[in-house]
Image (tube, rainbow, N blue to C red):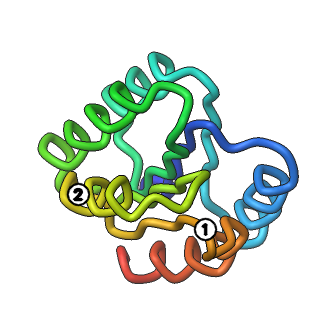
């Protein structure tokens, strides 16, 4: 049986550390990337169960990647984290296939509760 994989792009600091702890507790494979090209390559070679994507470094590229994942990997669910309160951007992320969109005022740390629930729902 293949281990559940979670692929992240753009997560760092305390949130990244909390996800690493979650990966150990819930026994999933956490693959962290900080470059969009690396994230794309990993998604193609070994499709994840869950993609966590932080928007803001390369907005056009990130949104195009989200759309491509939604179209080409129908079993992969995605969580998008926005760094600003932008309802239009949040709506666009939903339209492009995000299962959840976390933007202020919802704290990004909510992802720590959301990830185990989404992985359980995927089984």
Tag of residue 104: 1
Disc number for residue 95:
none
Point out the tag, 1 or 2, that comes first from the N-terminus.
Answer: 2
* Mark 1 neighbour density, 10 Å: few (under 14) some (14–19) many (20 or more): few
User: At numbered mark 1, what does the secondary structure look like: helix, strand or loop?
Assistant: loop
Determine the residue positioned at 58% across, 54% down. Answer: 84
**Secondary-structure class at tag 2:** loop
Q: Give the residue displayed 60% in from the left and 68% down from the top.
A: 104
Q: Quadrant of residue 115?
A: bottom right
Q: Quadrant of residue 44 in the image?
A: top left
Image quadrant occupied by the N terminus: bottom left
Q: Nearer the viewer, residue 43 or 106?
A: 106
Disc 1 and disc 2: Cα gap in Å? 20 Å
x and y percentages locating residue 66 in the rendered image: 30, 42
**Residue topped by disc 2:** 97
In the foreground, 40 or 103? 103
Of marks 1 and 2, the one in the foreground: 1
In percent of width and height, residue 94 lies at 27, 63
- Classify mark 2: residues with Cα within 10 Å, few (<14), some (14-19) or many (20+): many
Q: Position of residue 18 (x, y in %)?
A: 81, 62
Provide residue 89's location: percent of width, then percent of height: 36, 53
Asked whether, in this view, residue 69 is left or right of residue 51, the answer is left
Horizontal side, residue 16 vs residue 61: left or right: right
Whether residue 11 sits left or right of residue 114 in the image: it is right
Number of marks drawn: 2
């Amino acid at each position: 049986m293949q281990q559940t994989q979670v692929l992240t792009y753009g997560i760092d600091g305390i949130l990244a550390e909390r996800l690493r702890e979650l990966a150990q507790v819930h026994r999933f494979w956490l693959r962290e990337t900080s470059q969009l090209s690396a994230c794309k390559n990993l998604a193609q070679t070994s499709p994840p169960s869950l993609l966590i994507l932080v928007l803001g470094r390369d907005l056009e590229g990130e949104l195009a990647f989200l759309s491509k994942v939604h179209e080409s990997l129908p079993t992969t669910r995605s969580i998008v984290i926005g760094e600003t309160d932008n309802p239009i951007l949040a709506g666009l992320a939903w339209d492009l296939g995000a299962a959840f969109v976390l933007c202020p005022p919802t704290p990004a740390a909510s992802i720590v509760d959301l990830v185990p629930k989404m992985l359980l729902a995927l089984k």
